[in-house]
Image (cartoon, rainbow, N blue to C red):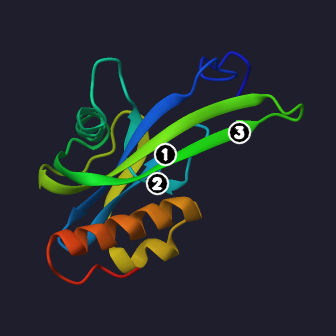
Amino acid sequence: MTEQDPRAYPDRPFVGVGAVIFRGDEVLVAMRGKLPRRDVWSIPGGAQEIGETYVEAAIREVKEETGLDIEVLGLVDVVDAINRDDDGRVRYHYTLVDVVAEWVDGEAVAQDDLADARWVKIEEINELEMRQATRDVIRMAAEQRGRARGGWPLRL
């Protein structure tokens, strides 16, 4: 990333919203097509816009990135991602809001800034190149979903 990046060296945090989407015993994973996490598996999501709730942002971002319609079931976690340069200045600061959701309609097709999007069995998550923090969010979402449905949570 260069200094020309409009999100570099911000004067306030940016809010990003991600969605852990389930369809049966599968979860949707998305490969980022742009820096900073290009070619790494993650969950779909993006920046919250002025005037929209985090739920509206999740629904919009998933539609833009994958073409899917989802139903947001709840909040999974909120994480601060802060990256500092060699001088200790904050280069990037994101507040990441992750939700758990169910697939409603559509076929997963990578769009917008994704290189790929696919459904995988929940137990396959550990085989993908993915940040541990993303696996942890997927695990928490699976447990939350299992409790909400009155059944056993899906296991990673």
Give left or right: position of 76 versus 80.
Answer: left
Residue lying at the far right in this picture: please name it: 87
Quarter of the rendering occupied by the C terminus:
bottom left
Closer to the N terminus: mark 3 or mark 2?
2
- What residue sits 38% from the left and 80% below the top? 123
Pointer 3: what residue?
83
Closer to the N terminus: mark 2 or mark 1?
1
- What residue sits 24% from the left and 63% below the top? 22
Amino acid on which disc 1 is placed: Arg
- Disc 2 + disc 1, Cβ < 8 Å: yes
Taking depth in this image into account, of 40 and 18 the one nearest to the observer is 18
Judge the density around disc 3: few (<14), some (14-19), many (≥20) Cα neighbours within 10 Å: some
Gap between marks 1 and 3 measured at Cα:
19 Å
Pointer 1: what residue?
32
The image shows residue 11, relative to residue 59, as above or below, that is: above
Image location of residue 76, percent across then percent down: 36, 56
- What residue sits 89% from the left and 31% below the top? 87
The image shows residue 8, relative to residue 25, as above or below, that is: above
Q: Nearer the viewer, mark 3 or mark 2?
A: 3
Image location of residue 144, percent across then percent down: 29, 68
Find residue 2 and report its image quarter: top right
Q: Secondary structure at mark 1?
A: strand
Q: Secondary structure at mark 3?
A: strand
Give left or right: position of 29 versus 53.
Answer: right
Can you tell which mark lies on residue 42?
2
